[in-house]
Amino acid sequence: MLTTFTRNLAQLIERDLRELAGGDVLDAVEVLNVDRLAYRVVQDAEGVRPAIVNDIVAWWRDVVDEQGLDFTAEFLNNEWEQVVLAQGCSSRDEYLTASRAGRGISLGRRQRVDVWRAVEALNRKLVDADKRTYLQLADVAAGYLAQRKIKPYQHVIVDEAQDLHESQWRLLRAAVDEHPDDMFIVGDSHQRIYDRRSSLRKVGINIVGRSKKLKINYRTTHEILGWSLSVLGETDFDDLDDGPETNDFAGYHSFLHGARPMSVEAGSAKEQLDALVDQVRAWIDGGVEEDEIAVTARASSSFDAVERALRDGGMASCRLGQELPTGIGVRVGTMHRMKGLEFRCVAIIDCDDDNMPAHWYVTSAAADPVQHEVDVVRERCLLYVACTRAREALWLGWSGKRSRFVPAVDSEMMT
């Protein structure tokens, strides 16, 4: 099995695998994202299609209101995912003794008891509705596979490993027998765009002495790579196994060279759109096909206006979703939708300090200073991912105050 986190990346991998190795390879290799694997295992074991909860924070808000708790729904959800589900706590006693390393707000015993009361209330609501989240589904699926003497796969290849939760790692560990050539894992903590900080060792996957750092970039130019790395700043990262990953970019290199990234500080949203259309048209006039160009932003609120502006300029566009696009035109999608994709030219809009970092997605420093820093780093990584989708040309635009993440175009960390 070849697996990853997002559905559209799994589809892209399957397409590329077919092109590189021929259609016959798919008789021996299955490509699917980890949520789809969990869903299928549970459906096969239980004989019915599982019902999934997507907006679990809304359920937590109901619990907070019903229980009269002082915690926010966001805090409880993070505690549930990062401590309870991550460590597989199935009882109050297990939670009371569970490590909360990496969590910003310390909790006394009485507060932990209140949290567990909230967890039990949420579980009751989910059971009554006969629904589960994908992380819960992964844990259930791991339990079903652990009981099987014959595992479904001989080998598992994991791409974008930094995006997976402990529950999902337990599922993958249970999907293949442990042997010297059981799993091949590729990950990059600089590209962590979801709140996942898993330790492979703690989920039974041993990589000590078996890992290698890759420092040659074959996608982007030296100029784009160097500038994109500066977006990450002086942040500390991890090695996906409880160890530090030093932020030393001196060894990272690309053998490709090209133009430095470009930026436009517009006086208004309308001026930004005009500059975007001019740049996309210039790329097309220079011989770049429309579907080799992507326009992206942190949020999709500007996309209707972007597509109208492109259409008025005589250019087609195609919105990126969960499925790989089949239509013609410039690809338009959020930064999350860009994960795993690549284009000759990428334009990033709305790089202002209101949208990047996304204030609605960052925990306030007053509420939880540690989670605040984690959220800010995740936003930096998201912009880094968007920038490194560009193979040849990168353009950034904004109106208002430039994002604190966006360095001057002349800045470059690599020499």
Image (tube, rainbow, N blue to C red):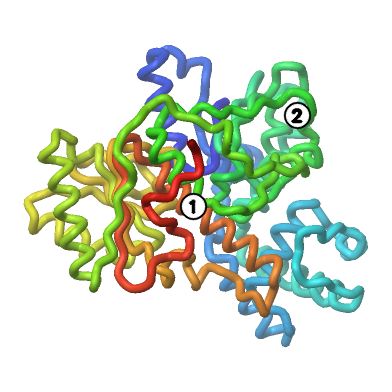
Report x, y in % for residue 8. 42, 41
Q: Identify the residue at image location x=46%, y=35%.
A: 10
Q: Earlier in the sequence, mark 2 or mark 1?
A: 2
Give SS at disc 1.
helix
Pick whichever, 293 or 272, lies toward us: 272
Foreground residue, 387 or 3?
387
Q: Is residue 5 above or below residue 306?
A: above
Residue type for callout 1:
Val
Q: Is residue 270 left or right of residue 263?
A: left
Residue type beneath disc 2: Ile
Instruction: Give percent across and percent down for residue 100.
Output: 82, 61
Q: Tag on residue 207?
A: 2
184 w.r.t. 125: above or below: above
User: Looking at this rendering, what residue extends furthest in the bottom direction?
Assistant: 68
Which marked residue is nearer to the observer: mark 2 or mark 1? 1
Label 2, label 1: how many angstroms apart (C-alpha)? 29 Å
Instruction: Report which residue position mark 1 lands on.
Output: 231
Quadrant housing the N terminus: top right
Q: Residue 252 placed where, x, y %?
A: 54, 33
Q: In this rendering, would 285 be left or right of 265?
A: left
Q: Position of residue 70 (x, y in %)?
A: 73, 84
Q: Where is residue 84, by image quadrant?
A: bottom right
Please give the name of the residue rendered at 58% of the width and 35% of the height, measured from the top-left corner: 250
Q: Does the image show residue 144?
A: yes
Q: Quadrant of residue 292?
A: top left
Any part of residue 152 in sight: no
- Above-or-below relation of 72 to 134: below
User: What residue sits 18% from the left and 36% below the top?
Assistant: 289
Q: Nearer the viewer, residue 91 or 203?
A: 203
Q: Is residue 331 left or right of residue 179?
A: left
At 64% from the left edge and 64% from the top edge, which residue is drawn?
373
